[in-house]
Image (cartoon, rainbow, N blue to C red):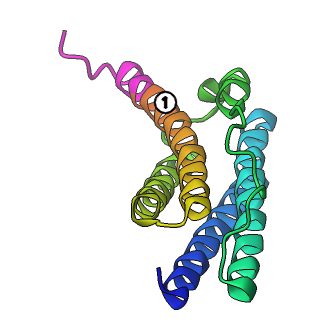
Amino acid sequence: MEQTGTLEILKQAIILEKRGHAFYQNVAKQAKDDAVKSFFEAMAKEELSHIKVLAAQFKEYHNKGIFQADLFDENEEIHFTLSILDSGIKEKIAAAGFEAAAISASISMEQRAVKIYSKQAEKAVDPEEKKLYLWLSTWEQVHLKVLMEIDKELMDQVWSDNSFWPF
């Protein structure tokens, strides 16, 4: 891939992660429940770690024209899902409240990130670039799965609370 195009993709990825970080941080500040606050703080922390990896890759590629190996552990086991779901987060978010709207917005952000990173992984020729985007895509897919599970629970809660069930 041409250097300018690669740097542009890395810039886009850094901006995407920075926006996610800022969003999650702001939602955490406004959350009233400690578990909900912790959830969004954890999401912000994940985005921050992605920013650091992407920034380091940007610097390496800008200076040397290569992707640096070993900036992240591609085999790292992701424990994010269990720790978040065990906190009882679903029960603490009001289905029609601010946090529920934030979950919905988060789903859109994470879907976009998965799409961008998956596409770049497919297009990448450099094995280290491919690893980077596959790693990022995997993390964002985990975020997306957690958010979608919470959203489904919230939807079920609204249906149940309002007796929308036709049977």
Quarter of the image holding residue 70? bottom right
Q: Is residue 167 above or below residue 18?
A: above
Which image quarter holds the C terminus?
A: top left
Q: Is residue 12 left or right of residue 104?
A: right
Most extreme residue toward the bottom, as rendered? 4
Tell me what residue is drawn at x 72 percent, y 40 percent.
39
Q: Is residue 87 above or below residue 38?
A: above
Q: Name the element at disc 1.
A: helix
- Where does residue 82 sit, x and y in percent of width and height? 68, 24
Residue toward you, 121 or 41: 121
Q: Is residue 92 magenta?
A: no
Most extreme residue toward the left, as rendered? 166
- Give the labeled residue for mark 1: 149
- Where does residue 10 sit, x and y in percent of width and height? 59, 76
User: Label 1 neighbourhood size at 10 Å, few (<14), some (14-19), many (20+)?
Assistant: few
Q: Is residue 163 magenta?
A: yes
- Where does residue 68 sit, x and y in percent of width and height? 73, 67
Tell me what residue is drawn at x 44 percent, y 60 percent.
112
Tell me what residue is drawn at x 73 percent, y 24 percent.
87
Q: At label 1, which amino acid type do we have? A: Glu
Quarter of the image holding residue 120? bottom left
- Where does residue 42 sit, x and y in percent of width and height? 76, 45
Residue toward you, 97 or 12: 12
Residue toward you, 22 or 74: 74
Q: Is residue 78 left or right of residue 140?
A: right
**Residue segment shown in magenta:** 156-167
